[in-house]
Image (tube, helix red, strand yellow):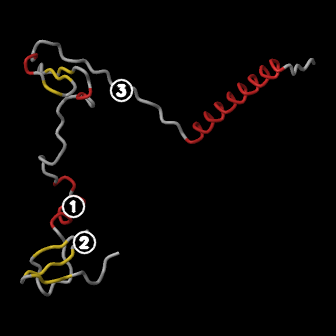
Amino acid sequence: MKKDWYVKFKEKGVIYMQCKYCDTYVKNVSEDAIATTCGTCTTLIQLKKFPDSLPKSWQKQSTGRPAGWHFMNEFVDKDGNVFHKGVEQPKLKGTLKPTKVKPSKKRKKLSADEKLFKQAEVHKEKQKLKRAFKKQKDFLDGKVNLK
C-alpha cells in the first residue's frame, strides 16, 4: 500500500526523503517533492518492465565446469587445469586427462495421490512386521494358541 506522504527532513541544508518502495533515504530532494524513488528501486522497476535490457556483465557466466566441481577430490577441466578440492594445482597442469562427468539422474516427481499410496504401502508393511514380531514374542513368552 502506497502512502500519500513520505518522511522528509532537512539536515545541514540537505533535504532527505524516504524512497516510496523500500523506505531508504534519498539525498538532495527538491523541497516541493511529494515522493521519490531510490536508484536501486528504479533499476529493479526497469528490469521488470524490460527484462532483455539486463547488461551482459550482470548475467550469469558459465565456466563450463559441472555443478559441484569444487567439492570433488580431483577435477581436471578441458584446458588441463588440475584442481584438488577446488584449489588449482599449477604444477600438475596438462598431466592428467579431463574428468568425465556423468549427468545426474532425473527423478520422477510423484503426484499427491502417488505419495499417499506409497505411504499407505509402507504403513501396511509396518503393521505386518509388528504382527509377526508380536506373534514371535507371544510364542517365546509361552502364550501359544493352538488352533
Reading the image, the residue beneath label 1 is 44
Query: Which residue is the site of mark 3?
Result: 104
Secondary structure beneath dot 1 equals helix
Pointer 2 residue: 23
Crowd class of label 3 (few under 14; some 14 to 19; many from 20; radius 10 Å): few
Residue 147 sits in quarter: top right
Disc on the earlier residue, 2 or 1: 2
Side of 5 relative to 122 (left or right): left
Q: Secondary structure at mark 2?
A: loop
Q: Is residue 106 above or below residue 44?
A: above
**Mark with earlier residue (3, 1):** 1
Select label 2 or label 1 by which is in front.
Answer: 2
**Which amino acid lies under the numbered mark 3 shown in the image of this protein?**
Ser
Which sits earlier in the primary sequence, circle 3 or circle 2? 2
Most extreme residue toward the bottom is 32
Alpha-carbon span between mark 2 and mark 1:
15 Å
Horizontally, is 48 left or right of 132 in the view?
Answer: left
